[in-house]
Image (cartoon, grey):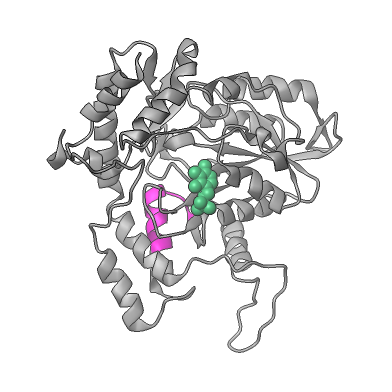
Amino acid sequence: MEPASILKAIKRCLPNEPGSPVSLHQPSFSGKEWEYVKECLDSGWVSSVGKYVDEFEERLQVTTGAKYAVAVMNGTAALHLCLQLCGVERDDEVLAPALAFVAVANAISYCNAVPHFVDSEERTLGLDPASLESYLQQFSEIKNGECFNKSSGRRIKALIAVHTFGHPVNLDAVSTVCQRFKLELVEDAAESLGSTYKGKHTGCWGKVSALSFNGNKIITTGGGGAILTQDEGLARQARHLSTTAKQSHSWQYFHDAKGYNYRLPNINAALGCAQLEQLSGFVQQKRELSTRYKNEFDNCSGIKFYQEPEFARSNYWLNALILDEEYSHHLEAILNLCNKEGVMTRPAWSLLNELPMFASCPQAKLPVAESLVKRILNIPSSAILGASNVQA
Ligand SMILES: *Cc1c(COP(=O)(O)O)cnc(C)c1O
């Protein structure tokens, strides 16, 4: 369990490219990206109307099995709209894992609602349904079919489940807690395109779900996101709100709600179509790389390679090593050494309840999240690193 031996083990899993730094996650553009984007430029349809937006949404539906997909500007905007579509209002509370990307808490606060942080479990790196259930039993009450926080008096309207690093949370158990406590389930599937839970795609379990196509995600549109839902009315509303809530009319500009300019431009959707054609290949390459990491770290003491939970088939978007408790003090030294030697690694996000703007938000006890955040090390994960023609 020496930092130098960890670095060596990581390097043994990577293709040999002496001298060039290895990034954590880089996109691959080896499909029809140029062709589709050129067509946008040639046709003049570059903005929020055009054939690629519709095409991209249709292909997302086919890929995920969701009935409806609505493409938007980024994953944060998707989360924001998801919460609105669930009826989250000013002064509501929304439950979310403390161990998550800041966009989750930001989206809640864009609704003038209050994030309420809960713990994660080591098995999935996501929400722990068991501790959530006993927490809610103790600290919430149901009145007129709605859940309330007994100490703040605020309504708890929804729960955001994040599929951390692409690994699905225990969706059956999380859904059961949501039903029992009258919470709307929003899936943050920003990292989990290509991951399934019990054979069904993540993003198909919540009332609404958010995807992201940021430059570091498994497929990218430059910037982009999408809302998935099984409900036609919600899909229509998502489309309406993301296009300034303008009523359809040949020349009149009439808007019937406080809308947003959140629609994904055609030129980004063109990229998305080309990227989506390569998704299954990317997942295969990432799983190949993860197998190499797993085998390499199988016999390493003090550290383990995080593997998908038994109920999931994961896209392994971002690979993670997890230090044993007694070695967590080595994290800093490993990060320093790897980054100095051109193998990019990074720790998990800072816990959201420790960020200044969310520090006074309500929170459950967070023993697992507090432990994990000191032990997680994300390691190089680009699909290209797993391609079989560049074997180490
Ligand atoms: C990337 C990401 C988001 C936000 O997506 P953007 O497209 O960057 O706005 C939200 N949640 C999680 C878990 C993410 O990884």
Front one among 275 and 214: 214
Answer left or right for 367 relative to 324. Answer: right
**The quadrant where residue 324 appears:** top left
Total residue callouts: 0
What residue lies at 25% left-to-right and 46% top-to-bottom? 281
Q: Position of residue 167 (x, y in %)?
A: 43, 33
Q: Is residue 151 above or below residue 160?
A: above
Q: Is residue 228 visible?
A: no
Q: Quadrant of the C terminus?
A: top left
Q: Quadrant of the N terminus?
A: top left
Q: Is residue 346 above or below residue 268?
A: above
**The quadrant where residue 115 appears:** top right
- Is 63 a magenta residue? yes
Q: Position of residue 11 (x, y in %)?
A: 24, 29
- Is 53 a magenta residue? no
Front one among 245 and 225: 225
Please identify the residue farthest to the left as the structure is shown.
389
Front one among 323 and 78: 323
What residue lies at 33% left-to-right and 55% top-to-bottom? 276
Answer left or right for 167 relative to 30. Answer: right
Please identify the residue farthest to the front as the structure is shown.
340
Which region shows up in magenta? 56-68
Q: Is residue 202 above or below residue 337?
A: below
Q: Main secondary structure of the magenta part?
A: helix
Q: Is residue 219 visible?
A: yes
Q: Position of residue 223 (x, y in %)?
A: 46, 59
Answer left or right for 55 relative to 95. Answer: left
Q: Position of residue 37 (x, y in %)?
A: 32, 71
